[in-house]
Amino acid sequence: MGDRLDRIGPAPTLAAATATSALACFTDYQLTPQRLKPGYEKRLSKPALAVVYGAFAAGLAVGALLTRARDSGRRT
């Protein structure tokens, strides 16, 4: 799948990272039992939590793009 994303551009990579972050948020706050939840919601507001998960998505996207750029340089 990464090769297909490379040909299209960075937007699908960002979309995939955003979806992964949203899934992580859903898992953290809907599927996980209360005793195992991260507990961030006790200290952070909802907008701050959105920023946290947005930063997670951005980190995933940047990491994927940098890794693909590095790997494509090795192939040439």
Image (cartoon, rainbow, N blue to C red):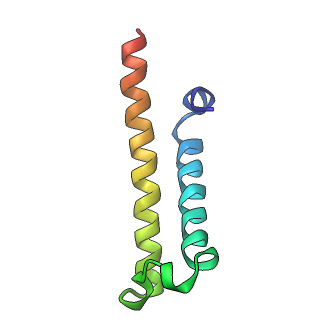
Residue 42 position in % (x across, y down): 41, 91
Question: Residue 21 versus residue 15: which sits nearer the camera?
Answer: 21
Image quarter of the C terminus? top left
Image quarter of the N terminus? top right
Q: Is residue 67 above or below residue 20?
A: above
Q: Is residue 17 above or below residue 76?
A: below
Q: Residue at x 37, y 17 (%)?
A: 73
Considering every residue shown, the one lying at the far bottom of the view is 42
Q: Is residue 20 above or below residue 24?
A: above
Q: Residue at x 56, y 44 (%)?
A: 11
Q: Residue at x 36, y 25 (%)?
A: 70
Residue 33 position in % (x across, y down): 58, 81
Tell me the quarter of the picture where residue 74 sits: top left
Question: Residue 27 versus residue 2: which sits nearer the camera?
Answer: 27
Considering every residue shown, the one lying at the far top of the view is 76
Q: Residue at x 44, y 86 (%)?
A: 41
